[in-house]
Protein backbone atom coordinates (compact mmCIF):
# COMPACT_ATOMS: atom_id res chain seq x y z
CA UNK A 1 0.00 0.00 0.00
CA UNK A 2 1.43 3.38 -1.01
CA UNK A 3 0.49 5.75 1.80
CA UNK A 4 -1.33 8.92 0.77
CA UNK A 5 -2.41 10.20 4.16
CA UNK A 6 -0.29 9.66 7.24
CA UNK A 7 -1.57 10.81 10.59
CA UNK A 8 0.70 10.18 13.56
CA UNK A 9 -0.03 10.51 17.25
CA UNK A 10 -2.61 13.22 16.66
CA UNK A 11 -4.19 14.88 19.68
CA UNK A 12 -7.02 17.43 19.27
CA UNK A 13 -8.56 19.21 22.24
CA UNK A 14 -11.53 21.52 22.57
CA UNK A 15 -11.53 24.53 24.88
CA UNK A 16 -7.77 25.08 24.88
CA UNK A 17 -4.67 22.95 25.36
CA UNK A 18 -5.90 21.55 28.68
CA UNK A 19 -9.42 20.76 27.46
CA UNK A 20 -10.75 17.26 26.93
CA UNK A 21 -9.14 15.29 24.12
CA UNK A 22 -11.68 14.60 21.40
CA UNK A 23 -8.92 12.89 19.40
CA UNK A 24 -6.52 11.29 21.84
CA UNK A 25 -3.44 10.04 20.02
CA UNK A 26 -4.46 8.69 16.64
CA UNK A 27 -2.28 6.95 14.09
CA UNK A 28 -3.88 6.46 10.71
CA UNK A 29 -2.53 5.65 7.27
CA UNK A 30 -4.74 5.68 4.18
CA UNK A 31 -3.33 4.25 0.98
CA UNK A 32 -3.60 5.51 -2.57
CA UNK A 33 -6.96 4.48 -4.08
CA UNK A 34 -8.02 2.99 -0.78
CA UNK A 35 -11.48 3.31 0.78
CA UNK A 36 -11.07 3.46 4.52
CA UNK A 37 -14.20 3.11 6.64
CA UNK A 38 -14.04 5.15 9.84
CA UNK A 39 -16.63 3.79 12.22
CA UNK A 40 -17.63 4.71 15.76
CA UNK A 41 -20.41 5.83 18.00
CA UNK A 42 -21.57 9.41 18.24
CA UNK A 43 -18.92 11.48 20.03
CA UNK A 44 -16.06 9.07 19.33
CA UNK A 45 -14.15 11.79 17.46
CA UNK A 46 -14.69 10.92 13.81
CA UNK A 47 -15.65 14.42 12.68
CA UNK A 48 -13.00 16.08 14.85
CA UNK A 49 -10.34 13.85 13.32
CA UNK A 50 -11.51 14.63 9.81
CA UNK A 51 -11.78 18.39 10.51
CA UNK A 52 -8.22 18.23 11.83
CA UNK A 53 -7.01 16.62 8.61
CA UNK A 54 -9.00 19.08 6.50
CA UNK A 55 -7.80 22.15 8.38
CA UNK A 56 -11.41 23.00 9.23
CA UNK A 57 -11.27 22.86 13.02
CA UNK A 58 -13.31 25.51 14.83
CA UNK A 59 -11.41 28.16 16.78
CA UNK A 60 -12.22 26.36 20.03
CA UNK A 61 -10.20 23.30 18.96
CA UNK A 62 -6.42 22.95 19.06
CA UNK A 63 -4.07 20.33 17.75
CA UNK A 64 -1.67 19.85 20.65
CA UNK A 65 0.40 17.01 19.26
CA UNK A 66 1.12 14.90 16.22
CA UNK A 67 1.57 15.20 12.49
CA UNK A 68 -0.61 15.07 9.38
CA UNK A 69 0.94 14.40 5.99
CA UNK A 70 -0.80 14.24 2.64
CA UNK A 71 1.33 12.86 -0.15
CA UNK A 72 4.39 13.89 1.82
CA UNK A 73 3.13 17.44 2.45
CA UNK A 74 3.10 18.54 6.09
CA UNK A 75 -0.45 19.84 6.53
CA UNK A 76 0.12 21.02 10.08
CA UNK A 77 2.77 23.42 8.82
CA UNK A 78 0.75 24.56 5.80
CA UNK A 79 0.01 28.28 5.63
CA UNK A 80 -3.01 29.96 4.07
CA UNK A 81 -1.60 29.99 0.54
CA UNK A 82 -0.66 26.34 0.70
CA UNK A 83 -4.10 25.40 2.02
CA UNK A 84 -5.65 27.19 -0.93
CA UNK A 85 -3.68 24.88 -3.19
CA UNK A 86 -4.58 21.76 -1.23
CA UNK A 87 -8.22 22.25 -0.28
CA UNK A 88 -10.69 20.94 -2.82
CA UNK A 89 -7.94 20.34 -5.34
CA UNK A 90 -6.10 17.64 -3.39
CA UNK A 91 -8.26 17.15 -0.36
CA UNK A 92 -12.02 17.38 -0.63
CA UNK A 93 -14.87 16.94 1.71
CA UNK A 94 -18.47 15.83 1.75
CA UNK A 95 -19.56 17.35 5.07
CA UNK A 96 -21.73 15.76 7.72
CA UNK A 97 -25.29 16.86 6.93
CA UNK A 98 -24.16 17.67 3.39
CA UNK A 99 -27.76 17.92 2.32
CA UNK A 100 -28.06 21.07 4.39
CA UNK A 101 -24.87 22.80 3.31
CA UNK A 102 -26.06 23.68 -0.17
CA UNK A 103 -27.17 27.28 -0.32
CA UNK A 104 -30.99 27.11 -0.38
CA UNK A 105 -31.45 30.35 -2.33
CA UNK A 106 -28.96 29.58 -5.08
CA UNK A 107 -29.43 27.22 -8.00
CA UNK A 108 -27.01 24.26 -8.04
CA UNK A 109 -25.31 25.58 -11.19
CA UNK A 110 -24.53 28.89 -9.49
CA UNK A 111 -22.93 26.98 -6.62
CA UNK A 112 -20.65 25.14 -9.06
CA UNK A 113 -19.86 28.51 -10.67
CA UNK A 114 -18.81 29.88 -7.27
CA UNK A 115 -16.44 26.95 -6.74
CA UNK A 116 -14.82 27.48 -10.13
CA UNK A 117 -14.41 31.20 -9.50
CA UNK A 118 -13.10 30.81 -5.96
CA UNK A 119 -10.62 28.02 -6.65
CA UNK A 120 -9.56 28.43 -10.27
CA UNK A 121 -10.65 31.95 -11.10
CA UNK A 122 -12.60 30.28 -13.91
CA UNK A 123 -16.05 30.95 -15.33
CA UNK A 124 -18.80 28.38 -15.81
CA UNK A 125 -18.49 28.46 -19.59
CA UNK A 126 -19.76 25.90 -22.10
CA UNK A 127 -16.69 23.73 -21.65
CA UNK A 128 -17.05 23.61 -17.87
CA UNK A 129 -20.80 22.97 -18.22
CA UNK A 130 -20.00 19.95 -20.31
CA UNK A 131 -17.44 18.68 -17.82
CA UNK A 132 -19.84 19.20 -14.94
CA UNK A 133 -22.63 17.45 -16.84
CA UNK A 134 -20.34 14.42 -17.24
CA UNK A 135 -19.48 14.64 -13.56
CA UNK A 136 -23.15 14.72 -12.62
CA UNK A 137 -23.78 11.77 -14.84
CA UNK A 138 -21.06 9.85 -13.02
CA UNK A 139 -23.00 10.36 -9.78
CA UNK A 140 -26.22 9.36 -11.55
CA UNK A 141 -27.70 12.84 -11.86
CA UNK A 142 -29.02 14.58 -14.95
CA UNK A 143 -27.46 17.91 -15.98
CA UNK A 144 -30.79 19.67 -15.39
CA UNK A 145 -30.08 19.64 -11.63
CA UNK A 146 -27.83 22.61 -12.40
CA UNK A 147 -30.93 24.68 -13.04
CA UNK A 148 -32.68 23.59 -9.88
CA UNK A 149 -32.74 24.87 -6.32
CA UNK A 150 -31.66 22.44 -3.56
CA UNK A 151 -35.23 22.14 -2.25
CA UNK A 152 -36.27 20.76 -5.62
CA UNK A 153 -33.98 17.75 -5.10
CA UNK A 154 -34.38 14.68 -2.89
CA UNK A 155 -31.99 14.06 0.01
CA UNK A 156 -30.09 11.44 -1.97
CA UNK A 157 -29.80 13.77 -4.95
CA UNK A 158 -28.46 16.60 -2.78
CA UNK A 159 -25.97 14.20 -1.28
CA UNK A 160 -24.79 13.25 -4.76
CA UNK A 161 -24.55 16.93 -5.79
CA UNK A 162 -22.16 17.36 -2.83
CA UNK A 163 -20.15 14.36 -4.00
CA UNK A 164 -19.98 15.86 -7.51
CA UNK A 165 -18.72 19.13 -5.99
CA UNK A 166 -16.11 17.27 -3.96
CA UNK A 167 -14.73 15.53 -7.07
CA UNK A 168 -14.83 18.60 -9.33
CA UNK A 169 -11.06 19.08 -9.18
CA UNK A 170 -10.23 15.36 -9.01
CA UNK A 171 -8.75 15.42 -5.50
CA UNK A 172 -6.39 12.80 -4.14
CA UNK A 173 -8.39 12.27 -0.98
CA UNK A 174 -12.10 12.67 -0.27
CA UNK A 175 -13.45 12.63 3.26
CA UNK A 176 -17.17 11.82 3.29
CA UNK A 177 -18.66 12.39 6.74
CA UNK A 178 -21.87 10.45 7.41
CA UNK A 179 -22.77 10.73 3.77
CA UNK A 180 -25.51 8.14 4.09
CA UNK A 181 -26.96 8.46 7.60
CA UNK A 182 -29.96 10.60 6.71
CA UNK A 183 -30.94 8.53 3.68
CA UNK A 184 -33.24 5.59 3.07
CA UNK A 185 -31.56 2.23 2.42
CA UNK A 186 -31.83 2.42 -1.36
CA UNK A 187 -30.30 5.92 -1.49
CA UNK A 188 -27.61 4.78 0.95
CA UNK A 189 -26.54 2.07 -1.46
CA UNK A 190 -26.55 4.46 -4.41
CA UNK A 191 -24.38 6.97 -2.56
CA UNK A 192 -21.91 4.29 -1.48
CA UNK A 193 -21.73 2.81 -4.97
CA UNK A 194 -21.23 6.33 -6.31
CA UNK A 195 -18.29 6.91 -4.00
CA UNK A 196 -16.81 3.57 -4.92
CA UNK A 197 -17.17 4.40 -8.63
CA UNK A 198 -15.47 7.78 -7.98
CA UNK A 199 -12.49 5.95 -6.55
CA UNK A 200 -12.31 3.76 -9.64
CA UNK A 201 -12.75 6.67 -12.04
CA UNK A 202 -10.41 9.33 -10.64
CA UNK A 203 -8.23 7.06 -8.49
CA UNK A 204 -8.96 9.01 -5.32
CA UNK A 205 -8.67 7.63 -1.81
CA UNK A 206 -11.76 7.96 0.35
CA UNK A 207 -12.32 8.11 4.07
CA UNK A 208 -15.90 7.05 4.61
CA UNK A 209 -17.23 8.05 8.01
CA UNK A 210 -20.30 6.44 9.55
CA UNK A 211 -21.94 4.58 12.38
CA UNK A 212 -22.93 1.50 10.46
CA UNK A 213 -20.07 -0.97 10.18
CA UNK A 214 -22.02 -3.42 8.02
CA UNK A 215 -23.00 -0.69 5.57
CA UNK A 216 -19.45 0.65 5.22
CA UNK A 217 -18.13 -2.85 4.80
CA UNK A 218 -19.92 -3.03 1.46
CA UNK A 219 -17.39 -0.68 -0.14
CA UNK A 220 -14.46 -0.18 2.26
CA UNK A 221 -11.13 -1.96 1.85
CA UNK A 222 -10.16 -1.46 5.48
CA UNK A 223 -12.05 -0.22 8.48
CA UNK A 224 -11.00 1.44 11.72
CA UNK A 225 -13.19 1.47 14.80
CA UNK A 226 -12.94 4.54 17.03
CA UNK A 227 -13.98 4.78 20.60
CA UNK A 228 -13.64 7.85 22.84
CA UNK A 229 -11.03 9.52 20.66
CA UNK A 230 -8.88 6.52 19.78
CA UNK A 231 -8.86 3.58 17.44
CA UNK A 232 -9.53 0.29 19.18
CA UNK A 233 -9.11 -1.84 16.07
CA UNK A 234 -8.05 -1.38 12.43
CA UNK A 235 -7.90 -4.01 9.74
CA UNK A 236 -8.98 -5.32 6.37
CA UNK A 237 -12.78 -5.54 6.20
CA UNK A 238 -12.87 -9.32 5.90
CA UNK A 239 -10.53 -9.78 8.85
CA UNK A 240 -12.54 -7.42 11.03
CA UNK A 241 -15.73 -9.33 10.30
CA UNK A 242 -14.27 -12.82 10.45
CA UNK A 243 -11.89 -12.37 13.36
CA UNK A 244 -12.65 -9.22 15.37
CA UNK A 245 -10.36 -9.04 18.38
CA UNK A 246 -11.73 -6.15 20.37
CA UNK A 247 -14.94 -6.57 22.36
CA UNK A 248 -16.20 -3.20 21.18
CA UNK A 249 -15.79 -4.26 17.54
CA UNK A 250 -17.64 -7.47 18.36
CA UNK A 251 -20.45 -5.47 19.89
CA UNK A 252 -20.69 -3.31 16.80
CA UNK A 253 -20.77 -6.38 14.57
CA UNK A 254 -23.42 -8.00 16.72
CA UNK A 255 -25.23 -4.63 16.77
CA UNK A 256 -26.21 -5.08 20.36
CA UNK A 257 -27.64 -1.73 21.40
CA UNK A 258 -26.67 0.15 24.54
CA UNK A 259 -24.59 -2.27 26.51
CA UNK A 260 -23.07 -0.46 29.47
CA UNK A 261 -19.63 -0.87 30.99
CA UNK A 262 -18.94 -4.47 31.91
CA UNK A 263 -15.68 -5.54 33.57
CA UNK A 264 -13.71 -2.70 32.04
CA UNK A 265 -15.00 -3.42 28.53
CA UNK A 266 -16.11 -0.31 26.66
CA UNK A 267 -19.81 0.19 26.35
CA UNK A 268 -21.82 1.21 23.34
CA UNK A 269 -23.41 4.17 25.07
CA UNK A 270 -21.36 7.38 25.07
CA UNK A 271 -18.91 7.48 27.99
CA UNK A 272 -19.02 10.24 30.57
CA UNK A 273 -16.08 12.71 30.48
CA UNK A 274 -14.53 10.91 33.48
CA UNK A 275 -14.89 7.48 31.87
CA UNK A 276 -13.42 8.92 28.71
CA UNK A 277 -10.38 10.43 30.42
CA UNK A 278 -9.74 7.27 32.43
CA UNK A 279 -10.12 5.08 29.38
CA UNK A 280 -7.77 7.26 27.34
CA UNK A 281 -5.19 7.20 30.10
CA UNK A 282 -5.31 3.40 30.24
CA UNK A 283 -5.12 2.58 26.56
CA UNK A 284 -1.86 1.65 24.93
CA UNK A 285 -0.76 1.87 21.29
CA UNK A 286 -2.32 -0.66 18.96
CA UNK A 287 -0.43 -3.91 18.39
CA UNK A 288 -0.37 -5.95 15.19
CA UNK A 289 -2.11 -9.30 15.56
CA UNK A 290 -2.25 -10.29 11.88
CA UNK A 291 -1.42 -8.84 8.47
CA UNK A 292 -2.56 -5.21 8.68
CA UNK A 293 -4.75 -6.08 11.66
CA UNK A 294 -4.16 -3.77 14.64
CA UNK A 295 -5.89 -3.85 17.98
CA UNK A 296 -5.71 -2.09 21.33
CA UNK A 297 -3.89 -4.64 23.54
CA UNK A 298 -5.94 -4.09 26.66
CA UNK A 299 -9.09 -6.16 26.41
CA UNK A 300 -8.07 -7.66 23.08
CA UNK A 301 -9.25 -11.23 22.98
CA UNK A 302 -7.97 -14.24 21.14
CA UNK A 303 -9.39 -14.94 17.68
CA UNK A 304 -12.71 -16.71 17.71
N1 LIG B 1 -17.29 22.38 18.79
C1 LIG B 1 -17.08 21.59 19.85
N2 LIG B 1 -16.80 22.10 21.06
C2 LIG B 1 -16.54 21.30 22.11
N3 LIG B 1 -16.56 19.97 22.07
C3 LIG B 1 -16.83 19.39 20.89
C4 LIG B 1 -17.12 20.16 19.71
N4 LIG B 1 -17.35 19.31 18.69
C5 LIG B 1 -17.23 18.06 19.20
N5 LIG B 1 -16.92 18.10 20.52
C6 LIG B 1 -16.69 16.94 21.40
O1 LIG B 1 -15.64 16.17 20.84
C7 LIG B 1 -15.94 14.78 20.93
C8 LIG B 1 -15.92 14.17 19.54
O2 LIG B 1 -16.97 14.74 18.77
P1 LIG B 1 -17.11 14.49 17.21
O3 LIG B 1 -18.12 15.42 16.68
O4 LIG B 1 -15.76 14.49 16.60
O5 LIG B 1 -17.68 13.00 17.20
P2 LIG B 1 -18.28 12.13 16.02
O6 LIG B 1 -17.63 10.77 16.16
O7 LIG B 1 -18.14 12.82 14.73
O8 LIG B 1 -19.81 12.02 16.43
P3 LIG B 1 -21.12 11.90 15.49
O9 LIG B 1 -21.17 10.45 15.08
O10 LIG B 1 -22.24 12.26 16.41
O11 LIG B 1 -20.97 12.82 14.34
C9 LIG B 1 -17.28 14.67 21.65
O12 LIG B 1 -17.03 14.44 23.01
C10 LIG B 1 -17.89 16.03 21.43
O13 LIG B 1 -18.75 16.36 22.50
MG1 LIG C 1 -19.49 13.50 13.33
Image (cartoon, rainbow, N blue to C red):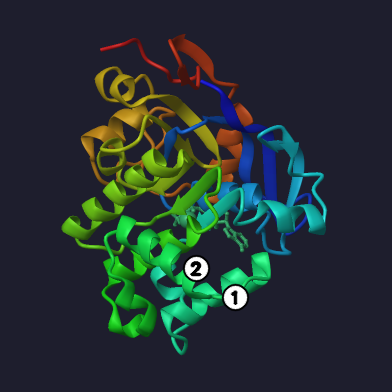
The x, y position of residue 154, in whole percent, is 26, 74
> Residue shown at 53%/14% (left/top)?
287
Asked if ligand 2 lies within 8 A of label 1, the reply is no
- Quadrant for the C terminus, please: top left
The x, y position of residue 179, in whole percent, is 37, 57
Task: Tell me: residue 236, above or below residue 75.
Answer: above
In which quarter of the view is residue 300 placed? top left
Circle 2 packing at 10 Å, graded few (<14), some (14-19), many (20+), is some
Q: Are marks 2 and 1 in contact (CB under 8 Å)?
A: yes
Residue highlighted by disc 1? 123
Residue highlighted by disc 2? 128
In which quarter of the view is residue 151 placed? bottom left
The x, y position of residue 116, in whole percent, is 59, 69
Q: Is residue 263 left or right of residue 166?
A: left
- Say whether residue 6 is visible: yes
Circle 1 packing at 10 Å, graded few (<14), some (14-19), many (20+), is some
Amino acid sequence: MTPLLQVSDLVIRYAGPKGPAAVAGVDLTVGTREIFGLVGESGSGKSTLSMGVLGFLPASAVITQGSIRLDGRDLRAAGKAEWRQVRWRELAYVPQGAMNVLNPVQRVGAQFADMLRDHLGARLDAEWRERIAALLQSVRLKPDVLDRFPHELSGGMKQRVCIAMAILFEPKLIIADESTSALDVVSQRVVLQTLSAVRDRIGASIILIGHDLALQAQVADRVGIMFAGRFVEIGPVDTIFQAPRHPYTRLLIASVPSIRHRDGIPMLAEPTPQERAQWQAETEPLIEVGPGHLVAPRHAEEGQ
